[in-house]
Amino acid sequence: MNSQQNSEAFSNKERAVSFLVQVAGGEVREAYERYVRSDFSHHNPYFRGDKDSLMSAMEEDAAKNPRKTLEVHRAIEEKDMVVVHSHIKQQQDDTGVAVVHIMRFEGGKIVELWDIGQPLPEDSPNENGAF
């Protein structure tokens, strides 16, 4: 995909989902090169707020969890913001985590990211489920 396609052919919602799918599939550096601006910042409290710190952490996680899965349940776009609600499993047999990623876009690229995760219990009393 060339930069013109990146900025014109796809919606920010499609870009956000593609970024997450590519990262979950272990193509972290490629996803950052394609979808993330150089002045990117994030708000994950476990890492420094810069692009390289989060990218390195995601690469390390991908190496430790090569069978990670991501299932997107919802993606909502409003102006320059995209919210993606997904189910991430590090291993096939775990219950996983319900995750919400909030991304702010500028010029067709992610410039800011927030992520919130909720581990899913083995036995939830909620008959509606997390999704």
Image (spheres, helix red, strand yellow):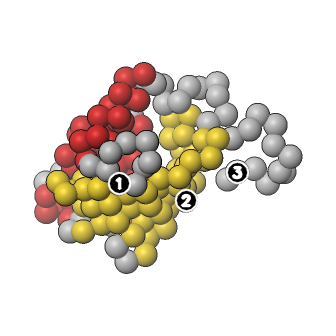
User: Of the numbered discs in the image, which one, if any, rests on residue 74?
Assistant: 2
Q: Vertically, is 130 above or below 58?
A: below
Q: Vertically, is 71 above or below 100?
A: above
Residue at 24% x, 68% y is: 106
Residue at 39% x, 70% y is: 81
Residue 23 in picture, x, y percent from top left? 36, 40
Of residue 100 and residue 43, the one placed in the foreground of this image is 43
Distance, label 1 to label 2, CA atoms, is: 21 Å
Residue ranking furthest to the bottom? 79
- For the residues carrying marks 1 and 2, which lies nearer the camera in this image? 1
Q: Vertically, is 106 above or below 88?
A: below
Distance, label 3 to label 2, CA atoms, is: 12 Å
Q: What residue type is labelled 3?
A: Ala
Residue 55 in picture, x, y percent from top left? 29, 40
- What element does badge 2 sit on? strand
Residue at 83% x, 51% y is: 126
- For the residues carrying marks 3 and 2, which lies nearer the camera in this image? 3
Is residue 15 visible to us here? no
Q: What residue type is labelled 2?
A: Arg
- For the residues carrying marks 1 and 3, which lies nearer the camera in this image? 1
Contact, CB < 8 Å: mark 1 with mark 3? no
User: Of the numbered discs in the image, which one, if any, rests on residue 130?
Assistant: 3
Contact, CB < 8 Å: mark 3 with mark 2? no
Q: Vertically, is 121 above or below 116?
A: above
**Is 20 on the left-hand or right-hand side of 38?**
right
Q: What residue type is labelled 1?
A: His
Query: Mark 1 sits on what residue?
Result: 42
Q: Which of marks 1 and 2 is nearer the N terminus?
A: 1
Residue 66 in picture, x, y percent from top left? 43, 24
Residue 21 in picture, x, y percent from top left? 40, 43
